[in-house]
Amino acid sequence: MTWPVVARRDLRELLAEKTLYYFCALFALVGGGVASIAARGQAPTRLSHLVALLFLFATPPLAVTFVQQAIPRSVTTGRIRLTLSLPHSRAAFVAGVGAAAVVAALAVTAAGVLGAVAMYLVRGAPVDLLGLVPVLALLVLLAAAFVGATLAFTARSRSTTLSVATGYGFLLLAFFWPVAVSLSTVVLGSTVGVPVPGRMVNTVTQLSPVFAYQNAVSALGLGIAGPVGHIPEWGGVVVLLAWAGLGYALAARRFGGIDL
Amino acid sequence: MSAIELSGVTKQFGDVTALHDLDLEVQDGEIYGFLGPNGAGKSTTIDILLDFVRPTSGRASVLGMDAQDDSLAIRQRTGVLPDGFHVYDRLTARQHLEFAIESKNATDDPDELLERVGIPDAADRKAGGFSKGMAQRLALAVALVGEPDLIILDEPSTGLDPNGAREMREIIKEEAARGATVFFSSHILEQVEAVCDRVGILQNGELVAEDTIRGLRDAAGTGTTLRVTVDVLTDDVLVAVRDVPGVTDVTADGDTLTVRTESAAKTDVLDAVEGTGADVVDFSTEEASLDDVFAAYTDEEVARA
């Protein structure tokens, strides 16, 4: 597989256009700013709790932002022709742009975490570095899940505008998943007359990458609990892996079938 | 062995048939020029060879391998200058080449490649600031990475100045001398004429002619024009020249005859003139240009359509 070569090339370009640096600086400031409030007082918020919660809202938009136009822009500009004139399979190309987006999103996340850690150290608040490790691992999965899903939705698109709308549309849906599930439940109940048990509704809600992350984080005892359904806490990890893996597989299949 | 072989390839985009039952064979080691007017299907053919698009029916093979099933192995041994490509604006020329070298596991020196294509000073410049010609040279350098067995160039002289086009021709000849097969599409006929062993003319998705340029000239019937100046032009001279087999038209202007021939040897024409007792003062030969040959094939097809 040649996807690391494609990923390195995309990261080089991201670094060259400086966007990544700006994002890192901004999120370091945001992380530090939020941490300065959380680290106050006699009982500061646990750092791992702060990071888990803060980046639940920050990492998914970053992942979507870095990947949503990757395939459509390559196709519409003709860059894909230069890349695929070399011995890279289409699947390797998809994996490469996805990996680059995950790394970019995690680099910005890491800058934010470092900003928060620095502020905790300045404030003299306890820094539980070991507690951060599983949270960071889950953030990697969260980023990969959103990248995989966005790739799947945009793989056949030739419109960068449409891909932006699709990417952010999915992001909104992932966060407002319970609303969508509740509406579907109401519609099912009123039109078909099928009552859906509350626990089943929660289970479907747990399938959102956002709530799967929340489910998995709750296993770490950080006090961030999501809806309780049939999926156990560790199952959140499986759901995130499924979004990442199936998303990539679907993206590779869809992109593999188009004329360039 | 065939470097490229298309057999019964048809490609439809919706209602539009871009290629219609195309058969094409390019021999190993030859320089093959692929001609045709805009929209004839040249780029679609190349896109099928590179697996950028899939044929609706038919089969394409490159270097003895299936163009779809073995696309990766093909591109490992092929250098491509694609049509409609775009460089990575924020990467330097050197970074483009490093990417290509890494992709092919090759050991080329980026500076040597840039020197060869005539942009040695652009190594550390971002490609977004390149002119069309410089981007084209950079893409050619990418195509040369790894000493490919087959080089596919789609409209390689687009954006190049005359010097650039000449350098491109030199590189094509050098690569052919190294043993590579070169397949390139173009609508600049003099470029094709200068380097190609064989030429195929594509029109409306069909190969309407394929031969050496000499063979195409003969087959197209565009013929040769002789201008013969004699000391005294008489009716006997005109009659004698008209009677030469293969002469299609004779006109006189002062002491100069303009003789169009399909197949007659110029010595036969000169013998006929001198057989009447006239002396040939001067003569010149004007072959039909490739433009004429191209027009003869494509206009005929347009008229037929």
Image (cartoon, coloured by chain):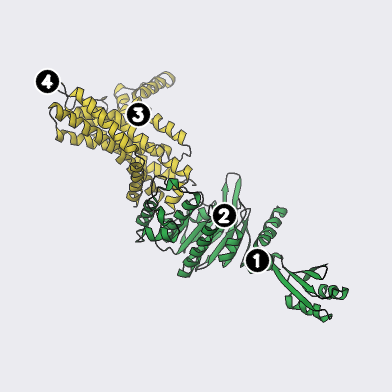
Chain colours: A yellow, B green
Please indicate whether residue A142 sits to the left or right of residue B19 in the image.
left
- Residue pointed to by mark 2: B42
Report helix, strand or loop for mark 4.
loop
- Residue type, mark 2 in image: Lys
Report helix, strand or loop for mark 3.
helix
Q: Residue at x 16, y 21 (%)?
A: A40
- Residue pointed to by mark 4: A42
Q: Are marks 3 and 2 in contact (CB under 8 Å)?
A: no
- Residue type, mark 4 in image: Gln
Report helix, strand or loop for mark 1.
helix
Q: Position of residue A27 (x, y in %)?
A: 28, 31
Residue nearest the observer in this picture, A236 or B265: B265
Q: CA distance from mark 3 to mark 2?
A: 46 Å
- Residue type, mark 3 in image: Ala
Q: Mark 4 or mark 2, which is nearer to you?
A: 4
Q: Are marks 4 and 1 in contact (CB under 8 Å)?
A: no
Q: Mark 1 or mark 3, which is nearer to you?
A: 1
Q: Is residue B117 visible?
A: yes
Q: Mark 4, chain letter?
A: A
Q: Mark 3 or mark 4, which is nearer to you?
A: 4
Q: Is residue A142 visible?
A: no
- Residue pointed to by mark 1: B216
Q: Which numbered circle lies on residue A174?
A: 3
Q: Mark 3 or mark 2, which is nearer to you?
A: 2
First in sequence: mark 3 or mark 4?
A: 4
Q: Mark 2, chain letter?
A: B
Residues beneath discs 4 and 2 located on the same chain: no
Q: Are marks 1 and 3 in contact (CB under 8 Å)?
A: no
Toward the right, the furthest residue is: B235
Q: Mark 3, chain letter?
A: A
Q: Position of residue B237 (x, y in %)?
A: 84, 75
Residue nearest the observer in this picture, A105 or B1: A105
